[in-house]
Amino acid sequence: MSLQNVKTHALKISLGIILSAFAVELVIGISSNSLGLVTDSIHAVLDSVVTGILLVTARWSAKPPDTDHTYGHGKIETMGSFVGGLIILAIACFFILEAISRFGEPRPAVLPGMMAVGAAVYTICSDGARVAILKRAMGRTEASSLRVDYYHAFMDIAATSVALAGILLVVVGFYQGDFVAGLILGFFLAALSLKLIYRNAMELTDAVPESMVRSVRDIVSGTEGVMKTEAVQMRRSGSDIFAEVTISLKGDSSFEEAHKISANVEKNIRDSISNSKVTVHFEPTWKDVPIDYIVNKVASSVRGVEGIHNISYTTKDGAFISLHVMVDRGMSLRDAHEVSDRIEEEIKKSVEDVRHITIHLEPYVSIPKSVPVEDLTIEEQVAGIIREYPRVRRIGRVITFQLQDVFKVDIDCSFDGSLTIEQVHDIVSEIENKIKDRIKNAIVTIHPEPQ
């Protein structure tokens, strides 16, 4: 049997039991002139109305999501429970007013006796059966309609018990015991119904317990790979709990890693909260990621950028960043400048306290798939320039690509491993500039490595 069938089956049985109790209490209550039994039978009629509402709304709430109800129809069940609480409150007010009015009336000629006691006992046993059936169903599916009817059955037991106590007082000679029982019962039901109304009203306004939100936030923050829990939004719809979580992941995480971390967040929440449906949004964070990596990642993502190199920066009194950006050699200056502006905007979004950004635009030349040919003349010129710098310990390969009037020069150089990266960068930049002065239309890339 499906969980939906479990819910509706339990409510149908509960409805049948209520109607049987109503018939017994009404007939015997009228014949024995028992206010408690007659009132409780009217209570049973209203109980049947409430349970009927819960049964109908439970069916409606099981409808799948559609274009008008993207979260499903679970709120219909909550609305039914809210209406049920209002009806119970009306019942409580009726009991109170009726009991108060009876105190001013003369002693009735007919008083309830043992038949009324038997009817009350039958109703209590019937309500006990309802409690058992509903509790078993709640063990298999969590639904607010079952919970409402479960609490309602307990209230019925209490109500009939008070009515029974009043009848017993009448039997021993205190004829006003029936009225006292009605008054006590009215206040009892009023308190419980107000609690029920409040809980369902909070659910209709998408309120969830603060402890549940805090628990989800702790679960998310405790998941490996999550840098920060940005936002947790939760709502309940019937028996389902929807959670939308926004997390920050390291900016250098691959998409595969981000997907894996998000999947773990979803699993951890579902394992902790039953009937939860989780959506995870992830955003990059550049905390503890080197600035040059951030700049390369962010700038490379800008449309029109063909390559990034020679990134340098200093963070003294704010971040000062410089980088070389390659764009299509046929791009106009206006378009290239727009690309540069977009790069600056994206870097400022990702790097804190940026004071200045210098972008050097260069024409991009694609590397041919064929094996490059060394140009000995250019190689000799390049080697001669590099020898002017004694800190270069060894000159490795010098490879050139000639495409029309452009030379692409790749150089491998070895440096003393004790030099700082800043010192190496300064030397490499100076060599590159000198090569470009000697060899026109040259695009130079130097690959430094420790000796």
Image: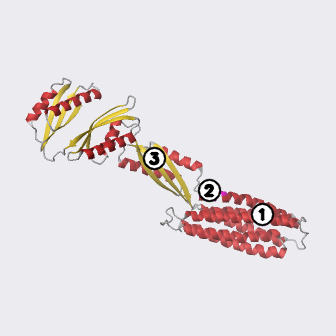
User: Dot 1: what SS?
Assistant: helix
Q: Label 1 neighbourhood size at 10 Å, few (<14), some (14-19), many (20+)?
A: some
Which residue corresponds to the image point at 9% horizontal and 37% vertical from the top-left?
A: 375
Residue topped by disc 3: 247
Decide: is 386 above or below 196.
Answer: above
* Chain-order first, disc 1 or disc 3: 1
- Picture coordinates of residue 160 (x, y %)? 77, 65
Residue topped by disc 1: 161
Give the extent of the magenta segment: 198-203
Residue topped by disc 2: 202
Residue 96 occupies which quadrant of the picture?
bottom right
> What is the magenta segment's predominant secondary structure?
helix
Of badges 1 and 2, nearer the viewer stands 2
Measure how far apart labels 1 and 3 are at the Cα level: 54 Å
Quadrant position of the C terminus in the picture? top left
Foreground residue among 348 and 1? 348
User: Dot 2: what SS?
Assistant: helix
| Res 29 visible | yes
Discs 1, 2 touching: Cβ within 8 Å: no
* Chain-order first, disc 1 or disc 2: 1
